[in-house]
Image: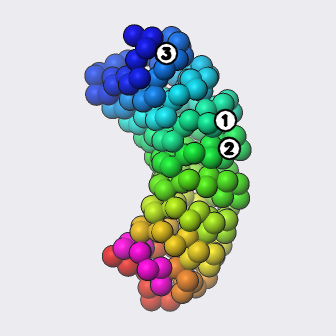
Amino acid sequence: MIDARELDLSSSKRFGEIPSEFSRLINLEDLRLQNNFLTGRLPDGLWELKKLRSINVSNNELSGKIPKEIYRASSSLEELWLSNNKFTGELPYQLFMLENLTHLNISDNEIEGYLSESVSDLVSLEYLNLWNNNISGFIPRELGELKNLEFLSLSGNQLKGPIPKELGNASSLISIGLFENELTGSIPKEITTLSNLKYLGLFDNKLEGMCQNLS
């Protein structure tokens, strides 16, 4: 088993913590543990796996903070799926050191604090979902530097202030969800004229103007 490249234990009614022994699977590229009843924290040893490309632990009962040690997987990790758990605390700056990351989903957790301007360091990012957390502060204009970003959801948080016009520089965007926040000001024309945009969800904010949704 030590030579396994893929381990799929999804939807297998598993309880307890993620075994620390997984860190011995030195050739592991894809770890799927979603749709179980796993508890506890993410083991630090996971980030020592130099070939780990994708990890999915969505739809469990995992808790604690997202570990700072995550940066150790920066050379290989492309997909990180942590949605629908009980993760708390702020997004560690080490998370933004994952320069090869294409998919990041931490939706439906209890994350708080700000979304750092360092998000622009995730230069390969195509999918960013932080829906339904407790993230506050402003939407960083640096999101506009993510030229590969297609899907963005920051809905269901406590974000305030204006929608940055620089978001219109993310020319690959297909879907933008910013609804159920505390955003104010007008809707930048730079966003509504994005050529690839299919969905724009802005309802339940304090925005001015008529364009609340585009779909």
Q: Which residue is mark 1?
A: 71
- State the residue in front, 203 or 144: 144
- Residue 111's spot in the image, x, y percent? 58, 45
Asked if labels 1 and 3 touch by Cβ distance under 8 angstroms, the answer is no
Residue under the point 46% across and 23% down: 28
Asked if labels 2 and 3 touch by Cβ distance under 8 angstroms, the answer is no
Q: Quadrant of residue 31?
A: top left
**At numbered mark 2, what does the secondary structure look like: helix, strand or loop?**
helix
Seen in the image, is 39 located left or right of residue 119?
left
Quadrant showing the C terminus:
bottom left
- State the residue in front, 70 or 42: 70
- Is 198 a magenta residue? yes
Secondary structure mostly seen in the magenta stretch: loop
Name the amino acid, label 1. Tyr
Residue 66 visible in the shown view:
no
| Image: 77 above or below 138 | above
Instruction: Mark 2 or mark 1: name the one nearer the start of the chain.
Output: 1
Asked if labels 1 and 2 touch by Cβ distance under 8 angstroms, the answer is yes
Label 1 Cα neighbours within 10 Å, binned few <14 / some 14-19 / many ≥20: some
Quadrant showing the N terminus:
top left
Structural distance between the alpha carbons of marks 3 and 1: 19 Å
Q: Which residue is mark 2?
A: 97
What is the span of residues highlighted in magenta in the rendered image?
Answer: 193-200
Label 3 Cα neighbours within 10 Å, binned few <14 / some 14-19 / many ≥20: many
- State the residue in front, 3 or 160: 3
Instruction: Mark 3 or mark 2: name the one nearer the start of the chain.
Output: 3
